[in-house]
Image (cartoon, rainbow, N blue to C red):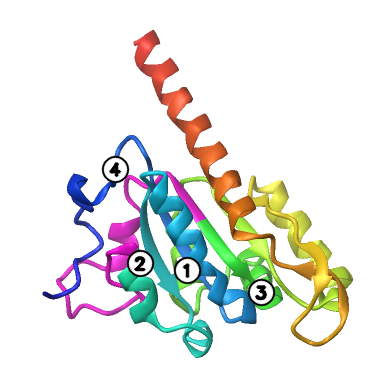
Amino acid sequence: MSPRTPERRVSKARGSVAGSGGRVVLGVTGGIAAYKSAEIIRGLRREGVEVHVLMSERARQFITPLTLQTLSGYRVLFDPWDLTHGADIQHITLARDLDAFLVAPATADVLAKMAHGLADDAVTTFHLAVTAPVLVAPAMNVWMWEHPATQGNLKLLKGRGVHVIDPEVGDLACGEEGLGRMAEPSEIVREVLTRLKKKARARLRVAASS
């Protein structure tokens, strides 16, 4: 069976409740914490959320697209200009009817690109096409996290309404200990669900007033 294209919904038989559970795109970038994206997908799917995955080229060095495709139930996108599965530009099609865009892990590099509007891979290109709420879960070395450039980029993103899920203190991949480890998948899932519920309540208020 060939992978499904992004515009098709997960069937209700598989437990998804697209339209009520929400529709989320997860952008995975190239950090060691990329392996935790599998648990994020599982956590969201358990709550009935439809999850699609985008990967940067470097992310594929840490976890395979096949793993995330199997967990999400949808073909993973990593080339924003891939037209082999239809004439639609996939990152534009996927941005429609979206409830949230989550980038986890969000490296210092991708945060800088998002802050300054660069679009050179699937994740950063998609970011510029999204009108839904955006969340980022940073993951990096403590010195990179504390660098004025990184903090400046975070300030820019927050000023545009991007929700930052702060990293934790702990052992880092470089062997040091400090602030910079990506938040636990369960915490990230909770943050996403909170925003999905807020958006659902807002829709209900609009419907009730019309």
Q: Amino acid at mark 3?
A: Thr
The quarter in which the N terminus is drawn is bottom left
User: Distance of mark 3 from mark 1, alpha carbons?
Assistant: 17 Å
Residue 123 in view, yes or no: yes
For label 2, the residue is 71
User: Pointer 4 and pointer 1: residues touching (CB < 8 Å)?
Assistant: no
Tell me which amino acid carries mark 2: Leu
Residue 79 seen by the camera: no
Decide: marks 3, 1 in contact (CB < 8 A)?
no
Q: What amino acid type should be assigned to the residue bearing mark 1?
A: Ala
The residue at 28%/67% (across/down) is 90
Q: Which mark is residue 18?
A: 4
Say which residue label 3 marks. Answer: 107
**For the residues marked 2 and 1, what is the alpha-carbon distance in whole angstroms?**
7 Å
Query: Which residue is at the front of the view, 99 or 40?
Result: 40
Q: Residue type at mark 4?
A: Ala
Name the residue furthest bottom: 61
Dividing the picture into quadrants, the one containing residue 70 is bottom left
Spatial distance from mark 4 to mark 3, Cα to Cα? 29 Å
Magenta part of the chain: 72-101
Front label number (4 vs 3):
4
Q: Which residue is mark 1?
A: 38
Select label 4 or label 1 by which is in front.
Answer: 1
Going by the image, does 69 lie left or right of 107? left
**Label whose residue precedes the other's in the sequence (2 or 3):** 2
